[in-house]
Image: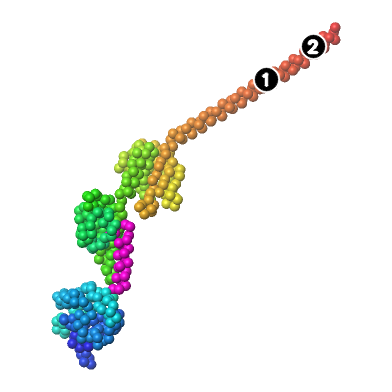
Amino acid sequence: MLDNFVPTGSVAGRETNGKSHGSLDADIIIKNAPDPIFISDLEGKILLANDAVYELLGFRTDEVLEQSLSRFISPEETREFTAALREVIERSATRNARLNPLTASGEIIPTTLNASALRDADGKVIGAIGILRDMRELDKVRAFSDSLIKNAPDPIFVSDLEGKILQANDAVYELLGFRTDEVIEQSLSRFISSEETREFLAALKEVIEKGVIRNTRLSPLTASEEVIPTTLNASALRDPDGKVIGAIGILRDMRELDKARAFSDSLIKNAPDPIFVSDLEGKILQANDAVYELLGFRSDEVIEQSLSRFISAEETREFLAALKEVIERGATRNARLNPLSASGEVIPTTLNASALRDPDGKVIGAIGILRDMRAYEKVVNDLQESKSELQEKILDLEKFEEVVVGRELKMIALEKEIETLRREIEKLTRGTN
């Protein structure tokens, strides 16, 4: 059937049994291809179709071949297909043109058309090889996805790789206060600063490379000119061939969380006890004035430093073990730490720590509260010394008691002897008389 046609990129082979090798191979490839494939001339008349086309449309061969494609699609789509043919002539190919052919049963089937140039032996474009893709299942998936996006409680938008917003749900409009026509087809740069636009475009590159990004900060400007702090989590939007063509972004309104964090920061800063925040490796991320007062270091000598700089290797291991306990149980109690101050003094402290969590509830660090134990240990030492002194006094008293009791016993014994002697004298006196 392709005796006089040579597909794009091939050259006329030598004739065998009246057919060129190129044409024969094309017949076999088209016939056995799983996708619906047809060949048309430049007026849209169908010259060849494989079994998958008949299976898709439900027509017989004689109802398809030599028929104009306009028999199966609407006048508007016929014009679009003719325009696609012109694109094939000019560029040799067209991609993902939408066609909705009508089947023998009257069903309209959504498809996409990818077409490449059909050339004769001299390389002249004489028609097109079209591959249809049945989009029914994909359209169902997209409809379901659209429904998920539309009804999601979080603000969700879809953008292309240049940052143009293609779709947004009601939560986006509620967050920003704009109408649909003020958002759709607009660049995200309309709502965020130049610096954040550059960060967003860099994030889109990360989406292309890694498929996802996490917790990028964006601060869009609302219709009322309020700047709203948000975090952006985005995943790749792919075409049917798996190519990344954009991003699906989920915004999280951080106003309440930022208020809570500001309140938390205020509590930490103004707390009378030394409080610090560390990551799970023991790096200090934040500390209040009481920490600097306790240790005698400047802020730049503490922040971003490992706690191991201030405590011994053994205590560092104990602290990391305490961090594991924080991850597992959410808190640790009365761990002993003896940090070295700027003056070289070893300061006895106890550490109580609780989990620091991200917005998703994952433990990302620890909030540690130190208690200076110097006064306590001084009291304990004073009590110990007092106890030792008291014990010595008790021993002295016991010795004194032993001496006093001994003397009293001797006096009693002497008194008894005197009494005995007195009685004997009285007896002797009476006997003499």
Q: Quadrant of residue 346?
A: top left
* Main SS class of the magenta portion in the image: helix
Q: Quadrant of residue 294?
A: top left
User: Is 147 inside the magenta-drawn segment?
Assistant: yes
Q: Quadrant of the N terminus?
A: bottom left
The residue located at (43%, 49%) in the rendering is 330
The residue under label 2 is which amino acid type? Ile
Residue 160 in percent (x, y) is at 23, 63
Q: Nearer the viewer, residue 174 or 165?
A: 174
Residue highlighted by disc 1: 408
Residues under numbered marks 1 and 2 in contact, where contact means CB atoms less than 8 Å apart: no
Identify the magenta region. Answer: 135-157
Q: Nearer the viewer, residue 421 or 266?
A: 266
Q: Quadrant of the C terminus?
A: top right
Q: Which mark is residue 425?
A: 2
The residue located at (31%, 64%) in the rendering is 147
Query: Farthest residue in the bottom direction?
Result: 17
User: Is 213 inside the magenta-drawn segment?
Assistant: no
Determine crowd level at label 2: few under 14, some 14-19, many 20+ residues with C-alpha closer than 10 A: few
Query: Farthest residue in the top direction?
Result: 433
The residue under label 1 is which amino acid type? Glu
Please say if 130 is above or below 219.
below
